[in-house]
Image (cartoon, rainbow, N blue to C red):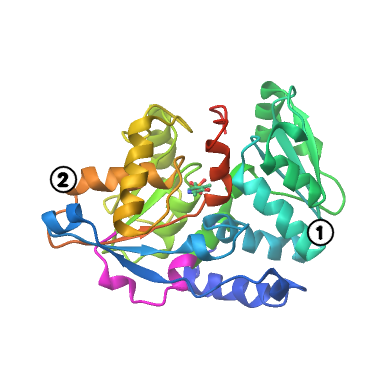
Amino acid sequence: MLPTYPIVDLIAQYESELEHLPRLEELGLHQDLAIETLSHPHFCHYGVQVAVLRADQLHPVISGNKWFKLKFNLVQARRQNCSELLSFGGAWSNHLHALAYLGQQLGLATVGVIRGEELDAQVNPMLQESVQRGMTLQFVSRREFRELRQDCAMLEAQGRYLIPEGGDNMLGMLGAASMMAALQTDINDFTHVLVASGTGCTFAGLRLGLPDRVQLLGVSALKGAWVQRAMVKRMAQLPVSTDNWRLSTEHHRGGFAVIDESLLSFMAEFGHNTGLELEPVYTAKTMSALFDFIQQQTIPAGSRVLFIHSGGLQGKRGFEPNPPQPGE
Ligand SMILES: *Cc1c(COP(=O)(O)O)cnc(C)c1O
């Protein structure tokens, strides 16, 4: 659990240790993330201002929120003298793809436990690249995957640091919170922050990092009533209030990685109007939810919204000729 001292101090402490990580500079991270104003007739019509935090521009491979969730875990692995990082994911996991790259650049061994015993590294370019970057893949059945995720004692080994699926642990949340600390603009200029949610780690972390008066809206890419229940439970364990966040479970558009023509045409139209490229699994669904929130006046006229572009464009190529299977 979170120590009781203020989160900004905790973030500062991890940031200062992060700076001492060998070879960090070689990653070439673009740390000063731009905030750009988005103009679209829909926003104008309803009198809502929308800006985007370009976390997608952080790095071409370690895109967006994945770095923020991993960075303090790297510090922790170093504190514990670990030289191998192990984590979990599906075949299309942006998280494992980012981890493989980080491992290669920082000189750490990486292991990815993949859901689906029938798969191999050739199934898609995300896994192929991860292997090329030195990641060892272990393919396990869905059942085994669930069991390992709940109790990973079997995977523990000397010098190995375990990271949950999606980088979803306390340090992942703290890293997501640090995204707000690093802003170039005063966050109090905004009334709402909007972000896509998968595991919910980024969403919960942002809540920790935001001032109370800024509303946080999340859009779940996953389907199911459990998503909301899990978030309520998670938030109850964090030092946050209950009335300044909302996670929509109504905008998954059929479920995780389910993509239809209307979403693709929304994405194309939006890109054409604003010049901002989105991907279909997370950010396009979240942006289309924003259109609804504005129209329904859940976000009223006069609001100033900061949309977090959480990245994911490196996984987008999967949606061109062969769509991935739901489940990752
Ligand atoms: C992984 C991912 C998310 C979800 O982040 P969580 O912390 O798991 O909720 C959102 N957007 C993009 C582009 C992602 O790749």
Q: Can residue 249 be seen in this view?
A: no
The stretch in magenta equals 179-192
Of residues 17 and 279, the one drawn nearer to the viewer in this rendering: 279
Of the numbered discs 1 and 2, the one sitting upstream in the chain is 1
Horizontally, residue 109 falls left or right of residue 74, namely: right
The N terminus lies in quadrant? bottom right
Q: Residue furthest right?
A: 158
Residue labelled with disc 1: 108
Tell me, yes or no, whether the highlighted magenta stretch contains residue 190. yes
Residue 160, position as x, y percentages in the image: 81, 51
Amino acid residing under circle 2: Gln
Q: Residue at x 33, y 76 (%)?
A: 186
Of residues 276 and 148, the one drawn nearer to the viewer in this rendering: 276
Tell me, yes or no, whether the highlighted magenta stretch contains residue 68. no
Residue 298, position as x, y percentages in the image: 18, 47
Q: Residue at x 36, y 52 (%)?
A: 271
Q: Quadrant of residue 22?
A: bottom right
Amino acid residing under circle 1: Leu
Horizontally, residue 201 falls left or right of residue 292, namely: right
Q: Is residue 55 visible?
A: yes
**Secondary structure of the residue carrying numbered label 2:** helix
Residue labelled with disc 2: 295
Q: Is mark 2 within 8 Å of ligand 1?
A: no
Q: Quadrant of residue 240?
A: bottom left
**Secondary structure of the residue carrying numbered label 1:** loop
Q: Residue at x 50, y 70 (%)?
A: 5
